[in-house]
Amino acid sequence: MLVRILAYFVPFAINFLSGGFFFITAYRFSEAGCSRTVISSSIVAWGVAYCLLTALVGKLASVKNALPFILAGGVTLSLTSVGFIVFDALYMQFLWLILAGFGAALFCTPFQLLAKDIESGSKKGVVSATAFYTLTWSAGLASGPLAFARFSLRQGFVITLILSLAVTLSVVLIALLRPRGGSANAETGKSVHEVIFPEKTYDKLAILGWIVGGLGTVTVCQIRALWPKLGLDLDIPQHHNAYILAVVSYVQAIVAVMLCRSKSWMWRRLPAVLMGGCGIVTLLAFAFAALISRHVAVFYLIAGAYGVYSGCFYFYLVYHSLAHPTRSGFFVTGNEIIVGVTSIVAPLLGGMLADICGYTEAAFVFAAVVALAAFIAQWYMLDPVKLATGDK
């Protein structure tokens, strides 16, 4: 039990750091009057570093060497926090975001393999690993912006430094407390969940997870990169800007917990309809709610509804990669590379589109179109006959 608590503290802490870095850099660029393209580029810098190192880590990581990689991530993020504190010039933020991307890349793929192994003793192993991982990183990503909304800039970075050091300590304790040699699953590399489809179907579902999760991440990037700008345009105070971002991720975390007893919705069409519809409607609501009311409560409600959508598609992404009976490592690495590439391209597209149109809301309309594309892919690929036979 203690090993599990320490293990799931790690994604909370690391994503606390990432969420705080994303929010405060975007907000500082917004306050400085930078263009929307520059503002969205803050996440791009992180994404480039994350994607490049993830590709390398994915080739090397396994259950056996996961802890050293996670430890290296904690140390890297400690250095990142120190950098933000000591060298706090506006455009130096890009350098520290690159280092933060390296730290996150050292953590994400190895941790998911570790989590699957830790949960492998239970019948709900894959679902539990997916739910608790999504819960903890979502809660961390939500909490990071709050630190910078409630404390001074320097105090916020001191908090991130303390948490990054706590990650390092947690990994050391896990290494000392975890049974030597891991589980049998670590040795075989095979999943222990019940196999109910042909292997080709698991390939197909994992690729669908890539599509849905990748396109979903495009929509998240518009919110994380450009909501601080839209909130500023609408005269919403800084702390409410942070709280609205936090609501997205907290609801996402709650949804992950509620999905911990999932059995079959991940490959059925009706849940895909409900999930996709929720995403499309809430993204359009972000774009046009100000035409109806600028009351901050409206945006809290929209953020909560969007969190239901993001919680579902992130669960979808992680579950289908971990559930593969023979190639979890490959598909988990693919998840992280897709998230990294998307984090590079999506904020730039949204920022440039908003600059061309002259309205920040244009990025949210773009996100709604992307959510529609993800929905169409689900409807096409979740054909019951094709799933049962493994046909394309």
Image (tube, helix red, strand yellow):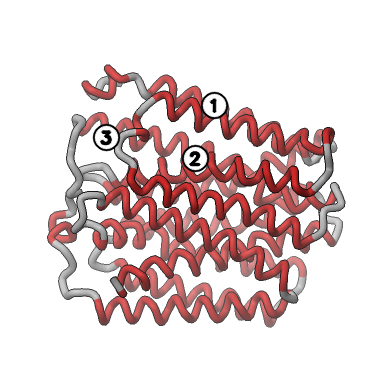
Residue indicated by mark 2: 214
- Measure the alpha-carbon separation of dots 1 and 3: 21 Å
- Measure the alpha-carbon separation of dots 3 and 2: 18 Å
The residue drawn where x is 36% and y is 33% is 265
Report whether residue 96 is seen: yes
The quadrant holding residue 194 is top left
Residue 65: x, y in percent? 27, 68
Mark sitting earlier along the chain (1/3) = 3
Disc 1 marks which amino acid?
Answer: Ala
Mark sitting earlier along the chain (1/2) = 2
Residue 329: x, y in percent? 29, 51
Q: Is residue 193 left or right of residue 18?
A: left
Residue indicated by mark 3: 202
Of helix, strand and loop, which one carries label 1? helix
Residue indicated by mark 1: 373
The residue drawn where x is 36% and y is 76% is 171
Q: Is residue 388 left or right of residue 247?
A: left
Residue 6: x, y in percent? 37, 73
Disc 2 marks which amino acid?
Answer: Gly
The residue drawn where x is 28% and y is 49% is 126
User: Viewer-proximal residue, 55 or 245?
Assistant: 245
The quadrant holding residue 56 is bottom left
The residue drawn where x is 41% and y is 64% is 107
